[in-house]
Image (cartoon, grey):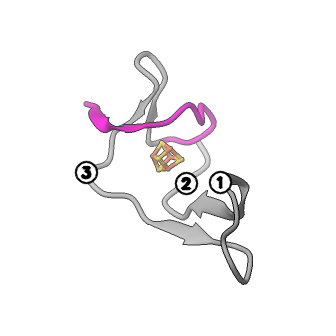
Amino acid sequence: MENRNIGCTVNECKHNNNGVHCCTLERIQIKCHTPRAESPECTDCASFTRR
Ligand code: SF4
């Protein structure tokens, strides 16, 4: 199973399809971990689950 609309290379996540570098979920939640997002580094995937 794979969702090619969500590209992701986080191999440590159990939702990641390592073969094609995408997420297997239909929907993910993204969050900001700084008061104000200024760059990609300020955001995280809140749907991450350790493999
Ligand atoms: S849940 Fe987030 S971190 Fe995990 S594979 Fe999907 S997009 Fe990547």
Q: Which residue is mark 3?
A: 26
In whole angstroms, how far apart are the C-alphas of marks 2 and 3? 13 Å
> Would you say 1 lies left or right of 13 here?
left
Name the spot of residue 36 as percent of width and height, x first: 69, 79
Name the spot of residue 48 as percent of width and height, x first: 55, 54
Name the residue at 70% across, 73% down.
Answer: 33
The amino acid type of the residue labelled 3 equals Glu
The amino acid type of the residue labelled 2 equals Phe
Nearest the eye: 19 or 6: 6
Marks 2 & 1, CB-CB < 8 Å contact: no
How many neighbours does mark 3 have within 10 angstroms: few (below 14), some (14-19), or many (20 or more)? few
Which quadrant, please, contains the N terminus? top left
Disc 2 C-beta below 8 A from ligand 1: yes
Disc 3 element: loop
How many neighbours does mark 2 have within 10 angstroms: few (below 14), some (14-19), or many (20 or more)? some
In whole angstroms, how far apart are the C-alphas of marks 2 and 1? 16 Å
State whether residue 2 is above or below residue 29: above
Q: Which residue is mark 1?
A: 40
> Would you say 30 lies left or right of 1 here?
right
Q: Main secondary structure of the magenta part?
A: loop
State whether residue 28 is above or below residue 3: below
